[in-house]
Image (cartoon, rainbow, N blue to C red):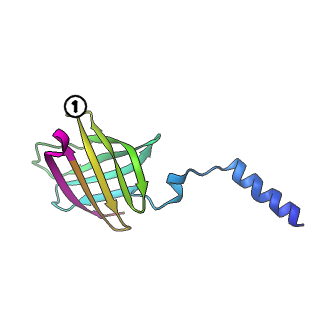
Amino acid sequence: MTKKIFNLILFVFITFPVSAFSMQHTPYGNWARGDNIAKVNIYQCGANLCVKNIWIRPGTKSEKVGDYLVIQIHSHKNGQITGIAGDPQRNLKYKISMQYASEKMVSKGCILGGLVCKTAHWKKID
């Protein structure tokens, strides 16, 4: 009986591998930015993390629904992500960090070697 249980457990782990990224708490889902200008969806896209605008306050000129970032993750542990975000709409790359919990997130993006940075506060909305 014990051997059958062991074989079943082994079969499950071999058949259904789980990446380390998917085992930990993730920032996936919909988030509203604290300035009430944007709502985004965060999802996994291959080995990267993608952030896509799903709502932009009417009259906002610098952002559009559908704009997105692709984040190459350098580190992801204990609710903190660091990496490089590519912004194809503006042809820019940002050094990015995100710190999140179940309902709140803070993101910081920097360009020009960290000379120009912007921090945003987010609230989970789904």
Q: Secondary structure at mark 1?
A: loop
Q: Which part of the image, by quadrant, shows the N terminus? A: bottom right
Q: How many marks?
A: 1
Type of the residue with mark 1: Asn
Position of residue 76 measured from the top left corner of the image (x, y, whole percent): 42, 53
Q: Nearer the viewer, residue 81 or 41?
A: 81
Q: Quadrant of residue 99?
A: bottom left
User: In the rendered view, would you say 46 is above or below 96?
Assistant: above
Q: Does the magenta portion include 107?
A: no
Q: Nearer the viewer, residue 45 or 118?
A: 118
Report the residue at 36% width, 51% height from top.
42
Task: Return the residue found at the far right.
Answer: 1
User: In the rendered view, would you say 46 is above or below 100?
Assistant: above
Q: Which part of the image, by quadrant, shows the C terminus? A: bottom left
Q: Is residue 6 left or right of residue 62?
A: right
User: In the rendered view, would you say 97 is above or below 111?
Assistant: below
Position of residue 30 measured from the top left corner of the image (x, y, whole percent): 34, 57
Position of residue 79 measured from the top left corner of the image (x, y, whole percent): 39, 62
Q: Residues within 10 Å of mark 1 (few under 14, many from 20)?
A: few
* Main SS, magenta residues: strand
User: In the rendered view, would you say 26 is above or below 88?
Assistant: below
Report the residue at 24% width, 41% height from top.
94
Question: Which residue has dot 1 on it?
Answer: 91
Position of residue 59 measured from the top left corner of the image (x, y, whole percent): 9, 48
Report the residue at 87% width, 66% height from top.
2
Q: Is residue 79 left or right of residue 55?
A: right
Range shown magenta: 110-123
Q: Does the magenta portion include 111?
A: yes
